Amino acid sequence: MEHSPCNEVNTTRKAPEGAIGQVLIEALPYICKFEGKTFVIKYGGAAMKDSCLKNIFAQNVTLLRKVGIRIVLVHGGGDAITKTAEKLGIASRFLLGRRVTDEGMISVIQMTLAGKVNQDIVQLISQHGGKGVGVSGLDADTIKAMPHPNAEKLGLVGEVEQINTDYIDLLCGAGLIPVIAPIGFDDEGNIYNINADDAASSIAIALKAEKLIYVSDVEGIHVGERILKTICKAEAASFIEQGVISGGMIPKVLSAFKTLDSGVGKIHLIDGKAIHSLLLEIFTHDGVGTQFISEEEHEQSQTR
């Protein structure tokens, strides 16, 4: 029978002591380097749906906080929203990759995203020894929003205008892990549905985060059969021109470099379906996904 990584207590197989020691030694300089730094993690994809992966992710996030890294978690939840809407007899429509959001749908989003989805994540973190706290973008004016440029067609879909970093810093300073549902508001009292990737990017920029990590169902940037360990803007532009990077990956890549240019230290794209991918990306030399790096860092790596 295949061994399940979520059922380790039932196996007699153990990693060699030397191997465990080597992993810990390799992680030590990264733990020292990142202590006290802020990581923003966008949580989505299969890692939010599979029970085993959900538990492993909660363990990983808790460990990161326990070693002194300030963690801010921004989550999606599109599938849960669609299912809840169906139960209430509300049809889901999408345009330009965004959910068309009327008054009925924004109520569903508030109920689902800022309710059950958010609190389930908080509970899992707590279960594994962490201290998560659920945050809606409406809480303490965390996410101030403005209408999306295509609001006439999309309805109550918004873009981030301002982030209340004081509140997030207060929570992080208290040893908590803010778990943020990407919902925003404006001065007129309108509530907006905000794309989780965009919210995570805006929060990372506002906090001047060391890292923004996208946990999704994508392994990284593929070139043929190879996953790029790092990519700089010039390389990305060339790959886009050649058609190596195409389709839905193009806006992800452009958004990543926009975030990098705005002062975030490094962007990571990792596969949430891979066991412990979050820890392996951060605490090992090779990593498991793709890092988006500056031109300067790329040049330095080429001359070493």
Image (cartoon, rainbow, N blue to C red):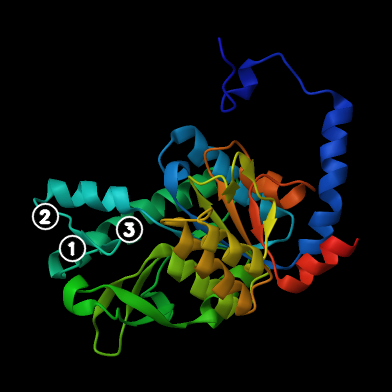
Residue 234, image x, y percentages:
65, 69
Tell me how far mark 1 sits from mark 3, CA to CA.
11 Å
Left or right: 186 in relation to 88: right
Compare marks 1 and 3 and give the one earlier in the sequence.
1
Disc 1 residue type?
Met
Left or right: 182 in relation to 187: right
Label disc, if present, on residue 274 of the rendered structure:
none
Q: In front: mark 3 or mark 2?
A: 2
Q: Residue tagged by mark 3?
A: 113
Q: Residue tagged by mark 2?
A: 90
Residue 294, image x, y percentages:
70, 71
Left or right: 211 in relation to 36: left
Identify the residue at image location x=47%, y=53%: 122
Tell me how far mark 3 sits from mark 2, CA to CA.
16 Å
Label disc, if present, on residue 105 of the rendered structure:
1
Q: Residue furthest front?
A: 242
9 and 254: which one is in front?
A: 254
SS class of the residue under badge 3?
helix
The answer to whether marks 2 and 1 mark residues whose Cβ atoms lie closer than 8 Å is yes
Tell me how far mark 2 sits from mark 1, CA to CA.
7 Å
